[in-house]
Amino acid sequence: MIKLVDDMLDISRITSGNLSMHFTETNLSNLVANVFEQFLAQLHSAGCELDFEIEKDIFINCDAYRIEQVISNIVTNVLRYAPGKPVKVTLNKSDGRAILKIKDNGPGIAENMHMKIFERFERIASSSVITGLGLGLHICKQIVESHDGKVFVDSKPGHGSEFIVVLPLGTSRETLC
């Protein structure tokens, strides 16, 4: 219930242009590792074996709380849509960007839904099968774009889904509100 209220508040802030961001230099490698450490018990309970490949000391200028929220929303979807399946997490840097990939081996997503799942209240499964309001990925997209980044999915039905978050490297951004 608390997550639902927080999501609804974030949607309201996003819609009104008042989603605050507090940018600081952040070790994204440590942040990603910490988020997955928090989810280890849930992933284990769901039967999701975790394969983790993180390049050390990738620094970005970000709102660490909001980037943690992005990762948590994606992992929550993995738990909903791909229980019992392995999950591969990679983080590296390339061409001045940090690239985080979270790949599950769930049912996959049809290509015509790739952009649509990032819209508000959009879900690919019926409410009788999967819980949630379809806000998590929309919030992810808004947060990542506010960091001058991109989030997208690479998926085909029957082949799982790979969520990719691309964020600029660097520490030159001023604190924003």
Image: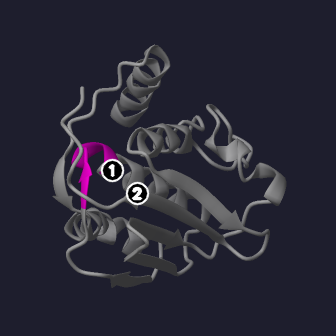
The residue at 48%/60% (across/down) is 165
Q: Residues within 10 Å of mark 2 (few under 14, many from 20)?
A: many
How far, Cα to Cα, is label 2 from label 1?
A: 10 Å
Question: Relative to residue 128, is residue 50 drawn left or right?
Answer: left
Q: Position of residue 28 (x, y in %)?
A: 26, 64
What kind of element bears circle 2?
Answer: strand
Q: Give above or below for 137 relative to 98.
A: above
Residue 105 appears anywhere in the view: yes
In this view, the mark in front (2 or 1): 2
Residues tagged 2 and 1 counted as in contact (Cβ below 8 A): yes
In terms of depth relative to the viewer, which is nearer, 104 or 91?
Answer: 91
Check residue 132 for magenta coloring: no
**Protein image colouring:** one colour
Q: Position of residue 70 (x, y in %)?
A: 40, 50
Query: Which image quarter holds the C terminus?
Result: top left
> Could you tell me the amino acid type at mark 1?
Ile
The residue at 72%/66% (across/down) is 108
Residue 128 appears anywhere in the view: no
> Could you tell me the amino acid type at mark 2?
Leu
Question: Relative to residue 107, is residue 112 drawn left or right?
Answer: right
Which residue bears the numbered disc 1? 67
Q: Which residues are magenta?
A: 60-67
Which residue bears the numbered disc 2? 167
Check residue 66 for magenta coloring: yes
Q: Position of residue 59 (x, y in %)?
A: 22, 65
In terms of depth relative to the viewer, which is nearer, 139 or 145?
Answer: 145
Q: Give above or below for 6 relative to 151.
A: above
User: Which is nearer the N-term, disc 2 or disc 1?
Assistant: 1
Q: Residues within 10 Å of mark 1 (few under 14, many from 20)?
A: many
Query: Which image quarter holds the N terminus?
Result: top left
The residue at 20%/69% (across/down) is 30
